[in-house]
Amino acid sequence: MKRVVVGLSGGVDSSVAAYLLKEQGYEVIGLFMKNWHDEGVTISKECPWLDDSNDAMLVADKLGIPFQTVDLSAEYKERIVDYMFNEYERGRTPNPDVLCNREIKFDVFMKIALSLGADYVATGHYCRKGEMQVDGETAFQLLAGKDKNKDQSYFLCQLSQEQLAKTLFPIGELQKSEVRKIAAEQDLVTAEKKDSQGLCFIGKVRLPEFLQQKLQPKEGDIVEIPASEEKFQSETQEFQNKLEELQFMSRKYSYQPSEGKKVGRHQGAHYFTKGQRKGLAVGGTPEPLFVIETDVKENVIYTGQGKHHPGIYRRGLFISPDEIHWVRPDLKLETDEEMPVKARIRYRQELQEARLYQIEHGLYIIFDKAQPSITEGQFVAWYREDELIGSGVIS
């Protein structure tokens, strides 16, 4: 009998995952990950992980499976929290959920599970795993969940073949409504429980407050850049070569305070991210202001009016060589190769038609349509049909 360790998070999805595996005849062990207990950096008055671990325990008890809690807070702090602060300080916007999957759930946690003699690790993610033969070897596929509204393949975009080989996604074929129905039928305490928001396993986080505890507030100007600014007027360009064209299409606009007007003050450019509207506290403009760029060196936030402001949009992006990841290494592009794909730059964004261009010193992705708020530090994931084949950090 194969042994599976399920990451029981105290939510409905992982509860049903555990139930289904047991039904399928696996020997199932439930493990709850405790990832946070630095009281110095508080997140909210309530302590959701205690409730969650209690719910996970009740589910395991109901299913009659062994249960234990593992404390991964040291690894979590080192690999996730510190990374977040460093990224924000550099003016990049990290994605802790993608990282938590790569570094914690499918690395530290997986090693613990394997040390318990597990053949597989299972999670309650809405995605599926496929297998195919490539040159006589098995290649594992990361496929979108059947519930298009809940598909979580994006969060797993950094997984490797080694990690996928040892992973099961029991609820990937189901709709969320079906998962809740199964939980209710089995009388699981998590059946009606709301989905968790906030950082992977830290509970209910409000980022600015969380960041303020480590990054010092620093007052600076909010500058509004008019949409009529010269740099936005697209003149037709002549390019010497393809590289020049790729660089032009994925270039970032840079701004000087003199190009706009000062409309307010802020408490620190590193608390803001591109495309953000809330928290600027500037009124009196015909259309709401959106962040179009943050300059953490000079501590200036540049904004534009309305969500169609040209400063928000870009056709392309670049990924540096050390931040390109192929979930399917057999599909990896060689220098000067290109590939049509569908891509997304954030969770739940509809897939967009795009093209990959591999050059000697990195990878360009050019979209058919200009994309709003392409944000450094976030992950872009690319797909063929419903298979996620690679990802990278936007640089």
Image (cartoon, rainbow, N blue to C red):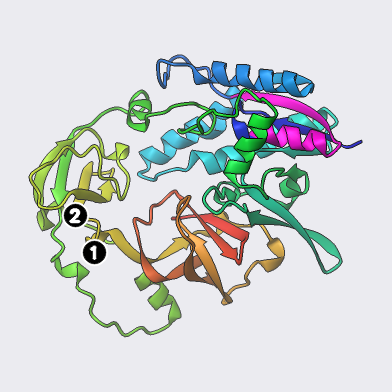
Residue 54: percent from the left, percent from the top? 62, 16
274 drawn magenta: no
Residue 354: percent from the left, percent from the top? 48, 70
Task: Label 2: state its secondary structure.
Answer: strand
- The tag on residue 304 is 2
Q: Is residue 171 above or below residue 64?
A: below
- The residue shown at (19%, 54%) is 304
Residue that label 1 marks: 310
Residue 240 lies left or right of residue 306; in this view the side is right
Residue 234 visible in the snapshot: yes
Residue 278: percent from the left, percent from the top? 25, 40
Residues tagged 1 and 2 counted as in contact (Cβ below 8 A): yes
Q: Furthest residue to the right?
A: 1
Task: Label 1: state its secondary structure.
Answer: helix
Q: Which residues are magenta?
A: 14-34
- Please state which of residues 187 and 272 is positioned toward the viewer in this rendering: 187
